[in-house]
Image: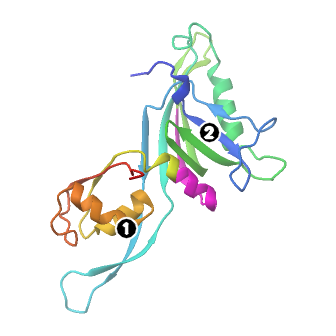
């Protein structure tokens, strides 16, 4: 299903400087999706070191590191005019703008641009990892009039800016997290709020009696952070 245009919430990819400051003016032009994403998924990957004694069954996992978040989107590119009040924007032009922002080598920095992705309250400085364009509809001349862009991005750390963005995009939302085996509540709290000291409040909200033994498959609620 293709959503109608909602300008305030359109998916945006903005080229930035290495320090995460949005760049303005040619050749740095943002890409604004005509339609909201069909799918938007965020992956968080925690690496554990397994310590298994010889002859023992099972292992005790020790936290090692948290890898940068990665996220993927599927965007529909439409050139029929059905969703733009009859204004037909060529699919090839929209795909070219996407490539100009995300993959083309920028002369000033001799590499593809650093990026900032914004969709609703989600804001993240990142790099494009890969993208695939699938053309699915053509006119009588063989020109594409509909396509889908599937893209994957990886978050990049930009010092204090990422802390500010995390405050804008994460704590103001209620998160539902499915617990995996051996996961610890303080680490989950750190991942959501960037502060593990909220774990007692999270335990209280979810009526957890023993936060040291979380049951795999349980869904926990991480509510918005209040000034109080």
Q: Is residue 7 above or below residue 83?
A: below
**Residue at x 24% of width, y 61% of height:** 203
Q: Which residue is drawn at 69% across and 39% down?
A: 101
160 to 78, vertically: above or below? below
Tell me where residue 142 appears, x and y as whole percent: 60, 16
| SS for dot 1 | helix
Q: Where is residue 113 in the image (x, y as percent from the top left)?
A: 71, 48
Q: Does residue 19 appear left or right of residue 155 in this picture?
A: right
For numbered disc 2, what is the local secondary structure?
strand
Q: For residue 156, which quarter of the picture?
A: bottom right
Q: Is residue 211 left or right of residue 167?
A: left
Distance from disc 2 to disc 1, alpha carbons, whole Å, reads 34 Å
Determine contact: label 2, label 1, CB under 8 Å: no
Extreme residue in the front direction: 228
Q: Residue furthest top?
A: 86
Pick the front one: 9 or 1: 9
Density class for disc 1 (Cα within 10 Å; few <14, some 14-19, many ≥20) is few
Q: What stretch is highlighted in magenta?
A: 149-166
**Left or right placement of residue 189 versus residue 138 in this view:** left
Q: Residue 141 vs residue 222: left or right? A: right
| Closer-to-camera residue (193/58) | 193
Question: Disc 2 designates what residue?
Answer: 13
Image x and y of residue 38, in percent: 43, 31
Q: Residue at x 42, y 44 (%)?
A: 41
| Label at residue 157 | none
What's the residue at 28%, 59% (across, down)? 202
Q: In this view, does 158 lie above or below 116?
A: below
- Tag of residue 197: 1
Q: In which quarter of the image is the N terminus?
A: top left
| Residue 226 is covered by the magenta coloring | no
């Amino acid at each position: 299903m293709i959503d109608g245009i909602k300008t305030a919430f359109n998916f945006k990819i903005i080229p930035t400087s290495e320090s995460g400051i949005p760049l303005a003016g040619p050749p740095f032009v943002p890409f604004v999706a005509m339609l909201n994403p069909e799918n938007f998924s965020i992956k968080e990957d925690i690496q554990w070191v397994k310590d298994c004694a010889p002859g023992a069954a099972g292992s005790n996992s020790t936290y090692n590191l948290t890898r940068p978040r990665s996220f993927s989107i599927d965007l529909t590119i439409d050139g029929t005019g059905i969703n733009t009040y009859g204004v037909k924007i060529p699919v090839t032009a929209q795909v070219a703008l996407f490539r100009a922002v995300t993959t083309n080598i920028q002369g000033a920095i001799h590499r593809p641009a650093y990026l900032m992705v914004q969709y609703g309250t989600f804001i993240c400085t990142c790099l494009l990892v890969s993208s695939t364009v699938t053309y699915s509809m053509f006119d009588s001349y063989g020109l594409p009039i509909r396509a889908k862009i599937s893209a994957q991005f990886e978050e990049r750390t930009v010092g204090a800016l990422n802390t500010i963005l995390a405050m804008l995009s994460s704590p103001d939302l209620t998160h539902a997290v499915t617990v995996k085996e051996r996961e610890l509540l303080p680490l989950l709290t750190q991942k959501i709020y960037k502060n593990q000291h909220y774990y007692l409040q999270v335990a209280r909200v979810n009526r957890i009696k023993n936060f040291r033994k979380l049951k795999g498959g349980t869904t926990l609620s991480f509510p918005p952070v209040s000034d109080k």
